[in-house]
Amino acid sequence: MKICHLTSVHSAMDTRILIKECQSLQKAGHEVVYIVPNAEDSVQFGVRIKGVMSTASNRLRRMVHTTSLVYEEAIRQDADVYHFHDSELIPIGLKLKAKGKKVIYDVHEDLPEQILSKQWIPGPLRKSVALAAKHFEKYASKRFDAIVTATPYINERFRKYNSNSITIHNYPLLQELIKTSEIQEVSKPLEDNKKRVVYLGGIYLLRGIKEMIRSVEKVNEMHPVEFRLGGSFAPASLEDEVKKMSGWKHVSFLGFLNRHDVKEELSQANAGLVLLHPEPRFVVSYPIKLFEYMSAGLPVIASNFPLWEDIVRENGCGICVDPLNIDEIAKAIESILTNPDKAAEMGRNGRRAIEDRYNWEKESERLIGLYEGIS
């Protein structure tokens, strides 16, 4: 089949879309095109990247102008199946269905829950906007050929709309983040003998950036530890704000990292932090960072959401804490740094869980099966 993946928001090198989904479909023998705004035409991992040049300068213009450009290019590609990744492309999906095309909606996040956390939407309007979005997703999803959801929680809702709805977890690729064929012993001293904790990902208030900095500062009252921070701040003003914190002196800010640099950073860390705030949409999510730390053989320090606790405790791969409790986070960091043998065991347990269950290779089989079912 000729398959066309569409986005108006994500990047050309998006890990879930390009490296996992598109590449897996290409390896299964399909011709795959990935339409992306403001990307250069190229071939990556056997997938043809097709860029559409958009001058959208704000969210509203992107939702109107950029989506129209994506649709025009989608029509030119004349694919057998269209697989789109952004809720703002739902109208585009409906247009493609009207032309007799097979269409898959890939739901990365729970849109109604996400809207309730959007600061740019006036507070009194959020519930109404969220409800309207939920009804629109219901209407459209009944008409699509399949729904792919990132978590079982989201899938519970969409299965009520479309029986051909499955969860494809965003688990790590088995060999991407592990440094060698053997799990790195996190108890092994690093060359510079520094202790490091790491967070790599989007840097937002709700993802716990201030709590992580304060916790590392507290640990440094007892033992020196460096906080390796990689990613991009949102909004940009947040960077100036957190750099004024007294704990910033313990932070090494790395900026945006490519996948090779992510692997290198994880290989040199003692623990990985994933301390999202208890927002409704986070509590039921499957955070890719948690699984990436496990894949790299790192013990994890994670928010104590029931879903996350089940994963961490069942696999013995880290410590769950109240993400808003600085003392509790600091105590967990201290425990891992001062118990290297136990930390190494946690790292091995996490990696074993990835190999046995939480890996993309298993998920890709389900994705390919979905396509075979709608062909």
Image (tube, rainbow, N blue to C red):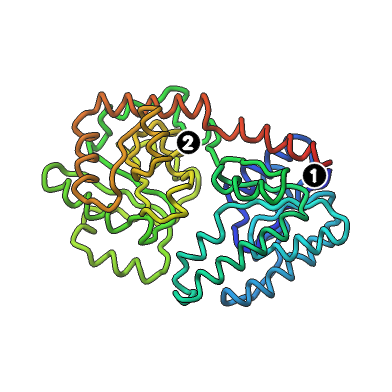
The answer to which of 95 and 176 lies nearer the viewer is: 95
Q: Measured from the top left, where is residue 251 in percent x and y?
A: 27, 54
> What amino acid type should be assigned to the residue bearing mark 2?
Leu
Label 2 secondary element: loop
The image quadrant that residue 40 belongs to is bottom right
Q: In what element is the residue under mark 1?
A: strand
Picture residue at 38% right of the left edge, 25% below the top:
348
Q: In which quarter of the view is residue 367 placed?
A: top right
* Residue 342 picture location, percent across and down: 26, 25
Locate residue 272, reporting x and y percent. Answer: 35, 41
Q: Earlier in the sequence, mark 1 or mark 2?
A: 1
Q: Which mark is residue 31?
A: 1
3D distance between C-alphas at marks 1 and 2: 27 Å
- Tell me, for residue 177, which label it has, or none: 2
* Rendered view: 330 above or below 183: below
Q: Is disc 2 surrounded by few (<14), some (14 to 19) or many (20+) residues within 10 Å?
A: many
Mark carried by residue 150: none
Q: Is residue 324 left or right of residue 28?
A: left
Residue sticking out furthest to the left: 222
Note whether 258 is above or below 41 in the view shown.
above
